[in-house]
Image (cartoon, rainbow, N blue to C red):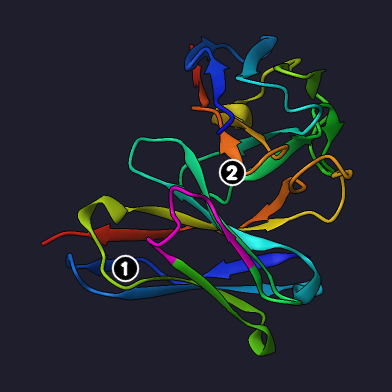
Amino acid sequence: DIQMTQSPSSLSASVGDRVTMTCRASQTVSRYLHWYQLKPGRAPKLLIFTASSLQGGVPSRFSGSGSGTDFTLTISSLQPEDFATYYCQQSYRSPLTFGGGTKVEIK
Amino acid sequence: EVQLLQSGAEVKKPGESLRISCKASGYDFSTYWIGWVRQMPGKGLEWMAIVYPDDSDTRYSPSFQGQVSVSIDKSISTTYLQWNSLRASDTAIYYCVRHSREGCDADCYLPHIDNWGQGTQITVSS
């Protein structure tokens, strides 16, 4: 299985901060790396697909980059509604695998 | 609007059987892969299984093969996740997910998940 490692596991930030988190794959996943946002009690939400494509309806402050094994999710200006846990996932090879998540907390 | 409406929370005892459901609406149910993702308490996400309703092609993650079964009823656009004998370790939130039809070239296994259900909490305790 392809192992996905996210860092940091958690971070504290303030509204307006630029936030960056990373996802590393144990082998190449090409561009098939996706980012999701999870909030307790809510249906998870797709943010970014194929490394850098913004899902429709997702604010442009979210962006993704990378290819191969190293990927980044950036929130350019953190908003109150962005406090959540973010997961990366690869769909290059079966079984699909997720990273362990990055929890974004209020500083 | 795509919706995945999951059945409600369940509290069961070890050894009991269970089937939870996910009713899809707002799109052509037959032509999108639909599946299940697990989130154990305090843990991350695990991809479990998928099914393609048009031909019932079903695929399981090795971690879940033989532990659960996935089925569909195309007539009511519903997919099911079933256990024959629950264990305490099955306690988790289970999400129904739909995979996109786009963004996957010949070299990738599946497209990304583009829609999620609200989750079904399963608690298994004696």
Q: Residue at x 60, y 20 (%)?
A: A26
Stretch of the chain drawn in magenta = B58-68
Q: Is residue A96 magenta?
A: no
| Residue that numbered label 2 is attached to | A95
- Residue A21: name its quadrant: top right
- Residue B99: name its quadrant: bottom right
Which is nearer the eye, A82 or A52? A52
State whether residue A22 is above or below residue A30. above
A41 horizontally vs A38: left or right: left
Q: Position of residue B18 (x, y in %)?
A: 33, 74
Q: Residue B10: which numbered mark, if any?
A: 1
- Residue A94: name its quadrant: top right
- Cα distance in 3D space between marks 2 and 1: 27 Å
Mark 2 nearby-residue class (10 Å; few <14, some 14–19, many ≥20) = many
Mark 1 nearby-residue class (10 Å; few <14, some 14–19, many ≥20) = some
Look at the image and tell me in which quarter the N terminus of chain B lies: bottom right
Q: Residue A20: which numbered mark, if any?
A: none
Q: Is residue B63 magenta?
A: yes
Q: Position of residue B91 (x, y in %)?
A: 29, 53
Which is nearer the eye, B35 or A18? B35
Q: Residue at x 80, y 18 (%)?
A: A65
Mark 2: which amino acid?
A: Pro
